[in-house]
Image (cartoon, grey):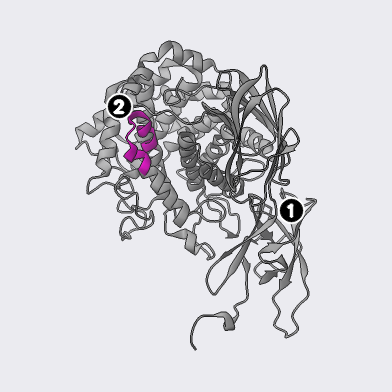
Amino acid sequence: MIYIAFKCNKYGRFLAFCVLCCCSAISFARQKGHVGDFISGTSQLEINGEIGQRLMASYQHRILAQDVDRLIAVFRKENRTEDHMWQSEFWGKWFTSAVQAYEYRPSEALKKVIDKAAKDLMATQTEDGYIGNYAPDHLLEQWDIWGRKYCLLGLIAYYDLTGDKKSLQAASRAADNLMSDLKKTDGIIVTKGNYRGMAASSILEPICLLYARTANKKYLDFAEQIASQWETATGPQLISKASIDVGKRFPKPKYWYSWEQGQKAYEMMSCYEGLLELYRLTGRTEYKRAVEDTWQNILDTEINLAGSGAAAEMWFGGKALQTNMIAHYQETCVTVTWIKLSLQLFRLTGEAKYADAVENAYYNALLGSMTADGATWTKYTPLKGQRLPGSEQCGMGLNCCEASGPRGLFAVPPYVSTASQDGLSVNLFMDGVYQLKSPIGQEVLLTQKTSYPLSGQIAIRVGLKKEEDMTLSVRIPSWSKDSKVKLNGDLLNELPSQGYVKIKRKWKSGDEITVQLDMSARLEERGGAEKQLALFRGPILLARDSRLIGPPVGVALAPVHLAEGTIQIEPVETNTDGIWLKFKAKFLPESYTETGAEPVEVELCDYASAGHAPGLPFYSVWFSQLIEPQQLNQNF
């Protein structure tokens, strides 16, 4: 089986379906230059510890708790009166996260909810195939096509989960309806909707997925038309401008939230997700190269220390400005889509840099936007300030980020461990059990025992029925400068400074790899004369929180160095509600006396926990440093 056509559920039941029923689709895709993924995700898994708790909290308190009838009501005939808002995205966002959650942990309760949600949405489809809530005289305007995209993604996800042909037929009819509606106008999708057509043309992703499942060439033709229209004068030029900074691709518009705005972060990355699906279908390397170049540019110019970025929903060159107070910073929808885009490239290439980016965003920006009980998600998460709840949107009882957050949360677990033609890989470190297929097709269990990221010690035990020659690879994060890896107790002498340790041998059940990552505290310096420091421990960005011991948040604090660039930091038992990880370190507070001040003990917590408490305590990842005039390079 090849991923471009189908994704197995936890029990592999859909694998059997696609092999029996869809050979023609797979064959056709290959004839057109199909490119398969380099890796495939875990078919069954169980995650323990903090991440496991977060997953189940979201499962119970956000996904199962959702009033699904409210999401579907907007699609019913009597409510198709919309002319500018985005209510129609919420069902698809929630539904795709519900399918991901079910694949992670199947339950009768969730399956019942999913089945009803799919059936009820399909019942709203009009005779001509439309699923949406826009008035007949406002079709294709504003967020109409964007909402249709999310309905398509949900229907296709349901088909992949269950093999229900009715959902695939409903998706096909909805796509046909869109194509018909466009033909009734000028046939140009990039002039429709918002943000240089990126919102509307991000429907490229489900159109490609639909072609992969039906082999109906009209969907591939439509997908190619979308990509072609991007490069017109009125399009977002996502391919030709791939080498240009994402925050500088178009002039600043007169109105920030307008069609002329070409820097919309979330919609831009959604389009690139679709372009990678089109690359899988066609093999056209310019598509993949455009996404790779843009991804690298986003990392280099926009992604902050917490692993995300964008302000007021746009790219703005934010990496260089991250020490400042920034309005509407780090939208959760952006964080989720950055993780999803990084996973797309990781699936295609297996390159460690994409796993590095996912780990950083997941542990910091994403978990930082989620309340510990999983019920709500903040819309914006600054690096200093407060965790303020987002406002309800469109009268739907939630906002776009609360709908998006679980999609990022449940997207990552299948890629903790992965399989390829060469063997197996451990990409992220989470206590749990992961079932994979070896190169010869036998089931392998990889069991991780770890308290990571509190500890950098990870034990990985292999379980398989018969011995097999293959490569087992373990990622060494780019931040771990002094790593140690042992195989069955024997130290491996030659390790890469980052990337993957690749161990090729005949593996047998009971073999064990132990990894010790360097959890030394790391200082990151940003800013110019107004220098700011931030502190990491392993993958975790640390923060001050006004609930914790130490001078007031915002006071200048200089780290007490053990040696250049190193600081002693110790774990502290957590007894503060809502705080996951807590540490202490010595700092020199600001002092305006000639003799200086004595070091003081300061408590820190993980960025994800900072600010999450009643009263909305202030927090900051930044340690302001005193300006030393004698060190300034300027003439007075």
At 63% across and 36% down in the image, what residue appears? 55
Identify which amino acid the numbered label 2 is placed on. Tyr
User: Dot 2, crowdedness within 10 Å: few (<14), some or many (≥20)?
Assistant: many
Residue 530 image point, x, y percent: 56, 73
Which quadrant would residue 348 be assigned to in this image? top left
- Assign a secondary structure to mark 1: strand
Q: Work out whether 315 lies above or below 235.
A: below
Which quadrant would residue 252 be assigned to in this image? bottom left
Q: Residue at x 47, y 43 (%)?
A: 337
Badge 2 marks a residue whose secondary structure is helix
Name the amino acid, label 1: Lys
In the figure, residue 534 lies in which quadrant?
Answer: bottom right
> With 100 as the anchor, is 185 left or right in this view?
left
In this view of the protein, which residue sits in the foreground, 52 or 496? 496
Q: Is residue 320 above or below residue 81?
A: below
Labels 1 & 2 near each other (Cβ < 8 A):
no
Is residue 459 on the magenta stretch? no
Give percent across and percent down for residue 125.
Answer: 37, 24
User: Magenta residues?
Assistant: 274-289
Q: Main secondary structure of the magenta part?
A: helix
In reply to whether residue 285 is colored magenta, the answer given is yes
In front of the other: 543 or 113: 543
The tag earlier along the polypeptide, 1 or 2, is 2
Residue 397: tell me if it is visible: no
Q: Does the image show residue 104?
A: yes
User: In whole angstroms, how far apart are the C-alphas of marks 1 and 2?
Assistant: 52 Å
| Residue at the disc numbered 1 | 582
Residue 173's x, y, as percent? 33, 23
Check disc 2 and report the residue beneath it: 219
